[in-house]
Amino acid sequence: RRCVVVSAPLEAEVSQLDDEEFRKEYLESYGLQDGERALPKILAESQGLLGLVSFLTVGQEEARAWFVPQGSRAAEAAGAI
């Protein structure tokens, strides 16, 4: 089994911190490697469990992430985008 442990009170507290370096040190003081927040971990685990990969597109007005099944060929991925 794979899981991601999240402390909602800690995440709420950290979201109020402005200084990125202090935020990283604060999270590391709780034993979180590299001061990483929970959301990127949740997204990565969810994507993996669902068997998806992401493609990024960037235009003049927006940047987007598109999710397609792992192993999709370029033409199939282009159809999703």
Image (spheres, rainbow, N blue to C red):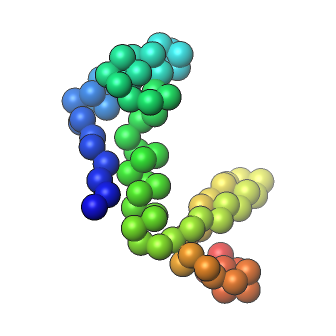
In the depicted structure, whether residue 36 falls above or below residue 27? below
Any part of residue 14 in sight: no
Q: Quadrant of residue 14?
A: top left
Quadrant where the N terminus is found in the figure: bottom left
Q: Quadrant of residue 25?
A: top left
Q: Position of residue 59 (x, y in %)?
A: 75, 58
Q: How many marks?
A: 0
User: As rendered, which of 33 and 72 lies closer to the eye?
Assistant: 33
User: As rendered, which of 62 and 38 lies closer to the eye?
Assistant: 38
Task: Name the residue at the front extreme.
Answer: 1
Q: Quadrant of residue 39?
A: top left
Horizontal side of residue 58 vs 65, given as left or right: right
Horizontal side of residue 13 vs 70, given as left or right: left
Q: Position of residue 80 (x, y in %)?
A: 61, 80
Q: Position of residue 44 (x, y in %)?
A: 46, 55
Q: Position of residue 33 (x, y in %)?
A: 44, 30
Task: Name the residue at the right extreme.
Answer: 60
Any part of residue 34 in sight: yes
Q: Residue at x 46, y 46 (%)?
A: 40
Horizontal side of residue 31 vs 25, given as left or right: left
User: As rendered, which of 12 and 23 lies closer to the eye?
Assistant: 23
In the depicted structure, whether residue 38 falls above or below residue 34? below
Quadrant where the C terminus is found in the figure: bottom right
Q: Residue at x 41, y 57 (%)?
A: 45
Q: Residue at x 31, y 31 (%)?
A: 11
Q: Residue at x 41, y 21 (%)?
A: 28
In the depicted structure, whether residue 9 falls above or below residue 78? above
